[in-house]
Amino acid sequence: QVQLVESGGGLVQAGASLRLSCAASVGSFSSYSMGWFRQAPGKDREFVATLSWSGTDTYYSDFVKGRFIISRDNAKKTVYLQMNSLKPEDTAVYYCAAAKSSLYTMALQYGIVYWGKGTLVTVSS
């Protein structure tokens, strides 16, 4: 059974950092584009960052560019999201996803084949 399991969420103050991890049990992990999405209370799920299968190409939403860094370790079948300079508006449930599509198509939430259950990030002011 394929699983994506997120961890690393929590309650932090504005300006702090957090590192989210997503451990995958999927086979051929290195063949998937990976990404992070988030959903704030009362809002639709939105794109945060995506990463190519090799880890060399990344794509970020405008509201996290320069603050968040997505990376992956294919040997550990894990994808990370380093979140710096957190703001209260970053408060959301963060979801990990895997796709067979390009990182740009994945950002539109097309071609996603697996989703994690999410980890809550709360940023207080």
Image (cartoon, rainbow, N blue to C red):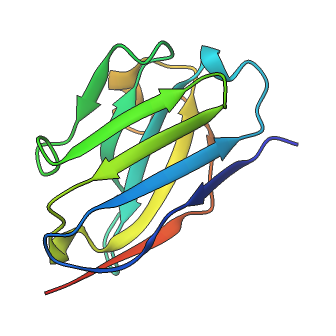
**Point 23% across, 46% down: residue:** 68
Residue 45 seen from this side: no
In this view, which residue lies farthest toward the right? Answer: 1
Which residue is depicted at the point 46% across and 42% down? 80
Task: Find residue 49 and report its image quarter.
Answer: top left
Query: Quick check: 57 left or right of 98?
Result: left
> Percent x, y for residue 106?
42, 30
Quarter of the image containing the C terminus?
Answer: bottom left
Q: In this view, does 108 lie to the left or right of 8?
A: left
Most extreme residue toward the bottom is 125
Q: Is residue 12 above or below residue 57?
A: below
Of residues 98 and 18, the one drawn nearer to the viewer in this rendering: 18
Q: Is 99 placed above or below 4 here?
A: above
Instruction: Point out residue 44 in the picture as x, y percentages from the top left corner.
Output: 34, 64
Vertical position of residue 28 compared to residue 19: above or below: above
Q: In this view, does 123 lie to the left or right of 109?
A: left
Viewer-proximal residue among 39 and 122: 122
Q: Position of residue 43 (x, y in %)?
A: 31, 72
Residue at 52%, 50% in the rendered image: 21
Q: Residue at x 48, y 12 (%)?
A: 54
